[in-house]
Amino acid sequence: MRTVISLLVSTVVVLRLGVGSMASATGVGDRVMATFVLRQTELEITVPDSAAAGSTGPGGTISATLGTVTVTDARAADPTWAATVSATDFTTGAGSPAETVTRGAVAYWSGPVTGSSGGGSSTPGQDTTEARVTLSVPVTAFSGRKSSLSTQTTSWQPTLVITPPASAVAGTYTGVIVHSVT
């Protein structure tokens, strides 16, 4: 009888919106001088809510596409950006060593650009499956530079390759893949 391990990948969004608005006023005679800070950062990343990775037996391999990830850069000028990806361990049950697939057993590759608009440049972190990297530490998924005053968007469809150890027990494993952009 073959044991089957199912993996579910939940993705979360981390985004950097910049400094919020702050205001102050100082009285000068009969006039009031007001100051405020305008937020200059309009950079965000969107990711799918979740993805089902499929199933395999202990010691097997699962390859699954996460869905479309998109960076939207509406900042002024031509700033650069970098999207980073990281992962948690995947666990089932109580998360004992036999119920854990470590993030070092999870590989990621961004693939090429699947959609873009607004000009500028973008570079995949890992454009082919041969360039995939483990998520034992955060890695660059994509980077780019905006080239005009228009909004730039860059999209890709990353793939995870998960290799549970032969000692893993059967179960549904859940982990979190985090994409962020700065």
Image (spheres, grey):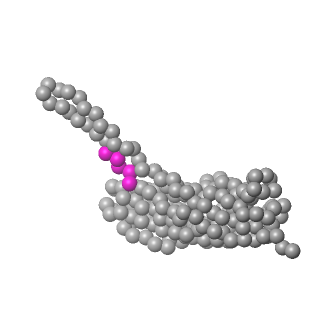
Tell me where residue 11 sits by quadrant. Answer: bottom right
Quick one: 155 or 58, which is closer to the camera?
A: 58
Q: Locate the N terminus and report the quarter of the image it occupies.
A: bottom right
Q: Is residue 76 left or right of residue 26?
A: right
Considering every residue shown, the one lying at the far right of the view is 1
Relative to the observer, which residue lies in front, 55 or 23?
A: 55
Residue 41: in magenta span: yes
Q: Residue at x 80, y 66 (%)?
A: 58
Q: Residue furthest top?
A: 29
Magenta segment, prevailing SS (helix, strand or loop): loop
Question: Residue at the location (12% across, 27% down)?
Answer: 30
Counting from the top left corner in percent of width and height, residue 69 is at: 51, 65
Q: From this view, report whether residue 38 is shown above or below residue 8.
A: above
Where residue 37 appears, x then y in whole percent? 31, 41
Question: Residue 34, located in which quarter of the rendered image?
Answer: top left
Front-most of 145 and 100?
Answer: 100
Q: Look at 25% across and 32% down and name the residue there.
A: 25
- 153 or 102, nearer to the observer: 102
Q: Residue furthest front?
A: 93
Residue 64 at least partly seen = yes
Magenta-drawn segment: 38-42
Q: Is residue 155 left or right of residue 166?
A: left
Total numbered badges shown on the rendered structure: 0
On the image, the x and y values in percent for residue 141 come to 56, 61
Q: Is residue 75 above or below residue 160?
A: above
Residue that appears at 50% across and 71% down: 113
Q: Is residue 132 visible?
A: no
Tell me residue 99's x, y (percent): 78, 57
Examine the structure image and report whether residue 37 is included in the region drawn in magenta. Answer: no
